Amino acid sequence: MTTLAFKDVIDSPLWRPTSPAPAAKAAAGCCINDARNGNVETPFPFSFFLDSATALYAYLPHNDEWLTLGSPALAGTFGAGAAVCFDPSQGPRGTIAAGATTTTITLTTALPAAVGVNQLANMGNGLGFQVRVVDNVAGGSGKTEIKRVIANTAGTTPTLTLDSALSFTPGTGAAYEFRSGRLFMLSSGTLASGAFKFYDVLTNSFSASLAITNLPASLATDSTLLPLSESFVPSTANVGEGFLGLIASGAASTTTTVTGSALPAGLAANEYRNFQVRIVTDTANPTATGQRRRIVSHTAGASAVFTVGTAWTVSPSATAVFVVENDDDKILLFTAATTVYNYNISANTWDTTTWAAAGTAAGAGLSAFQSFGVTVDAQRNARHSFVHRFRGAASNTLDVFDLAGSATGAWTAAAAYGGQATTFTTGQHWAYDPVTAGGRYAYAQINGTQRFARYDALNRVLEPWCYLRYPQGTALVGNTLHLAYAIDGTTKLGFLFCVVESGANQFACALQR
Amino acid sequence: VSDYANGGTEAKPIETAIQADGHHRQVVTIGDVGATLELLLGALASLPLAVDPSTGRLRVVLDATGGAQTLGTITTVATVTTLANMAQVGGVAANSAVLDQMTAAWAGALRGRIT
């Protein structure tokens, strides 16, 4: 087991160089990484660097080198406003063919692109992709389990060999969900068809053009894409078990409710409104398993009753086990405008009505992140539903958007925070670390300079981070901070990476305290 | 003064006279000579080199108009006040020295704290 023995003050953080990016950062070039915490689900090991409408690279910290992923051929004029996000719970989903065993399954629903033999047995770090199997067919077990692929046949409907046996034999038509992740990419300028696409990690393929209706006609200022992935959980929680762990039903469900048990006594009413309930296990009503429903309200306390917005297709039984997670079907887009744009993944539609608009527009230097990694404090002042938006536009203003604050969320404008003075503008970059240090910190490069800071989302304090003794080029929009983690059992050490402004050099700094 | 008989450069004849030796020679004024000398000095002044009268050393402007220059061996450079940029040393990226030092610093100071 790895042991960390950093001493405060004596062992101050220090940047070190890594392999430079294949190309110098251009305006709006942006990086992102998989933010899963490594509990149960292994994060995709690469970080991504979208440097233009036609250049996408991947960086593997294990080997300290970059790989070209090809051209997403995004439409629009790539520049200010372009953004990326990595949604780790997205990936090919479908059903399983007849003849499955506890260690082999064959897909019925075709993958978006053909894969080669054993391609799914190595993500790049030697470990295979993980697949969730939901045995939700009539007569099935009603269970959900996750396994790793160790071999596969070629094609779009491969047969997968799993690393260990399922506790059930999946029935014909049982569901599979690859936990491989997708990189969503939004171009800028005058938006046109082809400006929004995703890169599918599992099959190394780009999507066709995704919908852009209801997006602004053009994007020309910093933007932030924020996925509400169900794989985003507190730093101490297991991926797949949401914010409150596995919840045993405390009572029979109705067509629109499910009742919990042994929940935190301090759970506040509607603390997780606009999140989702997902049925993990239902051995009595196996076809209820795997259903996801958006929570429209819930009561407080240990036996909270969750009311969902759309009636269950099959009502969960009184013995069902469920979890409360982010609404996995949503990606939010924050722009310089006050509008919060909402992407519905499964429907492939954008809308501007799901979320309330901010009171004040943002500007260059804008960034937003959800503090899903924190442990909620005793007063429930820091919640998983909070999105912290630093407004940019040469201001030092923090706006907090509570996803659960009402049916459409609620904004708190100009929230006070410690250390508030530094103003944020072009070149201001953020990277949220939900995995280490209790999921408290978002790291910041100050306006494209050599100076760094970090923001404690639990306690709302900005504090200095580690100065980078290597010069930056001209400050650019586009967030080129990203993170990676060295994980050895329960020991986790994060590394913050920075591709310099208007250059290709990259540096890494251990998040050692 | 142009010497027609000895093949001198032809010039516009302003005035000629037969000298005792029988040659025709152009007659010019002292003012013309002065103007010609000024033209010559002007041309010399625009050249990128000059002699420092105090040391007798020849000063050369290497690159007054920009663009790449190639020098031969430089034996000694006493002091460089500012080196705006240096791309390579011996074919290796010049900043690698800085980057290698940063790597060594991290390895020496922090790597040992991870066991």
Image: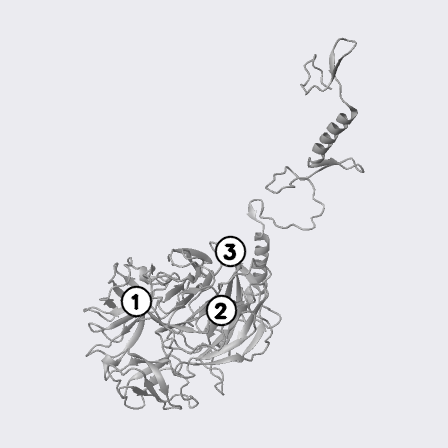
Residue furthest right as drawn: B54
A170 in relation to A473, above or below = below
**Location of mark 2 (residue):** A431
Give me the C-alpha separation between circle 1 and circle 3. 33 Å
Residue B28's x, y, as percent?
A: 76, 21
Question: For residue A92, which numbered disc appears in the image?
Answer: 1
Give me the C-alpha separation between circle 3 and circle 2. 19 Å
Nearest to N terminus: mark 1 or mark 3 = 1
Residue A447: image quadrant is bottom right
A73 in relation to A213, above or below = above
User: Label 3 lies in what chain?
Assistant: A
Residue A480's x, y, as percent?
A: 49, 63
Q: Secondary structure at mark 3?
A: loop
User: Label 2 lies in what chain?
Assistant: A
Nearest to N terminus: mark 2 or mark 1 = 1
User: Label 1 lies in what chain?
Assistant: A
